[in-house]
């Protein structure tokens, strides 16, 4: 006899937005940054964050039950993970992507059913607003916040790429769609013999230069302005694209891979990384949900399996390809020319 079915997982996922919004509100209010200073009592947290007495205890205790806070001797404290990753004052902060999720995505996902039936984006354009990237790049403050969020979601993978890829065999690299420049920076910090380029739209340049300057990398990293959809990609030994290909439909994906192939010398390498879906399309739930997020955010973007990407690379002419896990849901697909 098999196990009797239970509704536990159905209820947990079906009402999962309760836990999600509780965490997002905690990030929005800077709770974890506050508790990174020192553990605090209920009354202290309530006063500092302006919480109503009716909600404060339930809110904090819910975060304890969810595993995001600890409660010891009447005081609340961060867990090791929230202390490292959700304190805004630490360089390891990844809350930028959660801030964006709270401000934008949480509401847009309420229209997922419509997106599933129409195939159309459900973000700002649904109400007649500007396309997401156009609006972002027109507003320097929003752009900086968005690029910081991209650093947060990519940081772990950037560290893994710096550690796992055989960089000693190469001298130059370019991070295409570099955003704030964290991936380019982590590679440079780990390998002093390399010189790198961050390639993105001109509006990104000052943000990139400020970030790499803070890390003392101005002499080894440079910014190149350009539009990878319209112009050529810089010629270097290794080209990296992180969380880029999934933004575009299949013809655009293949066009970009072809541009990379043309830009690389013989023996050069192409690294694509994002939440690569497992080939059986049954285990990497984050990658599959990210693909639904591309439905919400774009007109043709979608995530894909490692086998898909290897096939597109081989079609473009790459002679060797491989898939390697990085961290969490992210993997990299490597192509050698």
Image: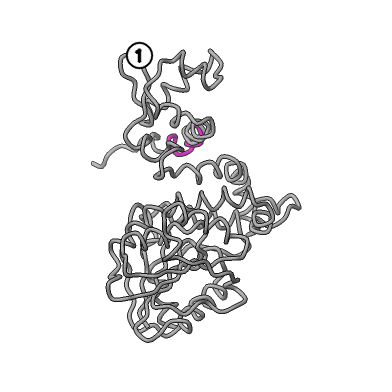
212 and 117: which is toward the camera: 212
Residue 22 in percent (x, y) is at: 49, 31
Residue 9, compared with residue 228, is above or below; it is above
Residue 93 magenta-drawn? no
Q: Which residues are magenta?
A: 10-18
The residue positioned 74% from the left and 49% from the top of the image is 127
Residue 13 magenta-drawn? yes
Residue 268, compared with residue 219, is above or below; it is below
The quadrant the C terminus occupies is bottom left
The residue positioned 69% from the left and 56% from the top of the image is 138
318 and 305: which is toward the camera: 318
The residue positioned 28% from the left and 64% from the top of the image is 164
Residue 71 in percent (x, y) is at: 34, 20
The quadrant the N terminus occupies is top left
Q: Residues within 10 Å of mark 1 (few under 14, many from 20)?
A: few
Residue 114, compared with residue 95, is above or below; it is below
Residue 279 in percent (x, y) is at: 36, 65
Q: Quadrant of residue 13?
A: top left
Give the mark count.
Answer: 1
Residue denoted by label 1? 74
The residue positioned 45% from the left and 27% from the top of the image is 34
Residue 314 in percent (x, y) is at: 40, 81
């Amino acid at each position: 006899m098999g196990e009797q079915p239970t509704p536990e997982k159905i209820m947990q996922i079906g009402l999962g937005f309760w836990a999600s919004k509780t965490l997002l509100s905690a990030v929005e209010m800077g709770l974890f940054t506050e508790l990174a200073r020192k553990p605090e009592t209920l009354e202290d947290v309530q006063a500092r964050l302006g919480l109503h007495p009716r909600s404060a205890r339930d809110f904090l205790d819910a975060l304890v039950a969810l595993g995001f806070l600890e409660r010891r001797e009447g005081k609340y404290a961060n867990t090791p993970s929230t202390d490292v990753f959700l304190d805004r004052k630490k360089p390891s902060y990844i809350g930028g992507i959660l801030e964006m999720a709270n401000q934008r995505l949480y509401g847009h996902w309420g229209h997922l059913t419509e997106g599933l039936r129409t195939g159309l984006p459900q973000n700002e354009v649904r109400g007649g607003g500007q396309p997401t990237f156009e609006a972002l790049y027109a507003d320097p403050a929003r752009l900086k916040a968005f690029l910081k969020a991209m650093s947060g979601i990519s940081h772990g993978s950037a560290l893994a790429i710096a550690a796992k890829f055989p960089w000693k065999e190469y001298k130059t690299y370019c991070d295409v769609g570099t955003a704030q420049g964290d991936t380019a920076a982590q590679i440079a910090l780990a390998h002093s013999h390399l010189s790198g380029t961050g390639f993105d739209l001109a509006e990104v340049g000052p943000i990139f230069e400020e970030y790499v300057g803070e890390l003392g990398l101005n002499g080894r990293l440079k910014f190149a302005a350009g539009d990878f959809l319209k112009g050529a990609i810089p010629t270097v030994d290794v080209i990296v694209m992180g969380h880029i290909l999934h933004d575009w439909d299949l013809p655009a994906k293949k066009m970009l891979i072809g541009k990379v192939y043309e830009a690389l010398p013989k023996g050069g390498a192409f690294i694509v990384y994002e939440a690569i879906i497992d080939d059986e399309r049954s285990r990497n739930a984050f990658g599959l949900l990210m693909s639904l997020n591309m439905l919400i955010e774009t007109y043709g973007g979608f995530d894909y399996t490692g086998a898909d990407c290897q096939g597109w690379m081989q079609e473009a002419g790459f002679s060797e390809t491989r898939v390697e896990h990085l961290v969490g849901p992210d993997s990299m697909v490597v192509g050698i020319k």
